Image (cartoon, grey):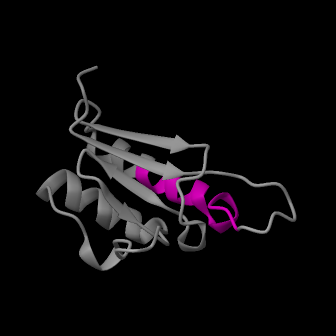
């Protein structure tokens, strides 16, 4: 497999019950991951796109599910299945971020 041109990293961190911080897994991260996987399957871009679940915290838990896109270093928050499709298509087809879904500066 060649090096991917676009790599979507979806936070799927699961914290123990009662933990004081929220986690992306409890906010629907698996649905988000599935949506990205479905877009990858539908587009057949396996040679240029990679979708990965990240099992450790990516940081801004209150904004989860979090998606980071590399090599662009673009971060998104509150990504549901509908947003996932738009983010995927915009990065893969246009090479552009979806500004209205991006995390704001100072979120971390």
Dominant SS of magenta comes to helix
Kindly give the residue lying farthest to the left in the view shown: 94
Q: Is residue 62 magenta?
A: no
Kindly give the residue lying farthest to the top in the view shown: 1
72, 5: nearer the viewer? 72
Kindly give the residue lying farthest to the right in the view shown: 18
Q: Quadrant of residue 105?
A: bottom left
Number of numbered discs present?
0
46, 100: nearer the viewer? 100
> Residue 90 at what x, y percent from top left?
21, 62
Q: Quadrant of residue 21?
A: bottom right
Residue 25, placed above or below residue 82: above
Locate residue 94 relative to residue 69 in the image: left or right.
left
Image quadrant occupied by the N terminus:
top left
| Residue in the picture at 59% in, 52% down | 57
Which stretch is magenta? 22-36
Locate residue 78 relative to residue 74 in the image: left or right.
right
> Residue 25 at what x, y percent from top left?
66, 58
Kindly give the residue lying farthest to the bottom in the view shown: 100
Q: Is residue 25 magenta?
A: yes
Residue 29, placed above or below residue 62: above
| Residue in the picture at 24% in, 29% down | 47
| Residue in the picture at 22% in, 64% down | 97
Residue 66, placed above or below residue 51: below
């Amino acid at each position: 497999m060649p090096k991917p041109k676009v790599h979507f990293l979806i936070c799927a961190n699961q914290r123990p019950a009662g933990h004081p911080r929220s986690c992306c897994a409890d906010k629907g991260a698996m649905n988000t991951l599935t949506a990205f996987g479905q877009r990858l399957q539908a587009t057949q871009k396996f040679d240029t796109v990679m979708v990965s679940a990240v099992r450790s915290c990516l940081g801004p838990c209150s904004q989860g599910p979090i998606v980071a896109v590399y090599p662009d270093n673009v971060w998104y928050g509150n990504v549901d299945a509908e947003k996932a499709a738009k983010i995927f298509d915009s990065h893969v087809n246009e090479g552009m971020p979806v500004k209205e879904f991006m995390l704001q500066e100072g979120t971390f």
